[in-house]
Amino acid sequence: MSHQRKFDSPALQHSYDRFIAGDAAREQAYEQELANADLARMIYDLRAASGLTQRQLAERVGTTASVISRLENADYSGHSMAMLRRVAEALNQRVEVRFVPREPVVGQGLRPNGAR
């Protein structure tokens, strides 16, 4: 996995380089936490832009405000596609999932046309 992150802040760069970079497990955990935070922020931003409270969105989705609060929490990692689709529908959105290539792991590269 090991790809180098670049930060505008020298302090953040130093911390990343010292505590995360070069450790595949830490890099993977860091990227997962960034993804969780991004998803939580997207849900919050869409709800806020729609002028809805967590309780109002919860009513539209058919759940409770505490579930919406959890979805908007950057530390939450239990997102399900079914719930994301319900939230998207309530906000007049759709969920789009993409698979994007990452750096190949040495010894696990793909041959032409994706053959192994």
Image: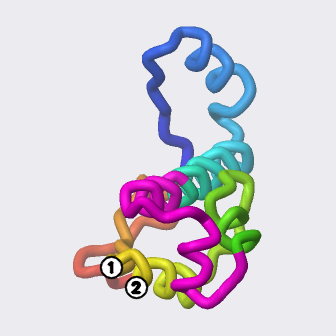
Image: magenta residue range: 41-64
Q: Residue at x 72, y 44 (%)?
A: 26
Q: Depth check: 78 or 62 in front?
A: 62
Q: Depth check: 96 or 11 in front?
A: 96
Q: Depth check: 63 or 5 in front?
A: 63
Circle 2 sits on which residue?
89
Label 1 with label 2: CB-CB less than 8 Å:
yes
Residue 31, given in percent of the width and then of the height, sits at: 59, 49
Answer with the quarter of the image where residue 104 lies.
bottom left
Check disc 2 and report its element: helix, strand or loop: helix
Residue 74, given in percent of the width and then of the height, sits at: 66, 52
Q: Amino acid at mark 1?
A: Asn
Magenta segment's dominant SS is helix
Q: Is residue 3 above or below residue 89?
A: above
Mark number displayed over residue 92: 1
Mark number displayed over residue 11: none
Q: Residues within 10 Å of mark 2 (few under 14, many from 20)?
A: some
Q: Residue at x 55, y 43 (%)?
A: 2
Residue 46, given in percent of the width and then of the height, sits at: 41, 61
Q: Is residue 103 above or below residue 52?
A: above
Q: Amino acid at mark 2?
A: Glu
Can residue 106 be seen from the camera position used here? no
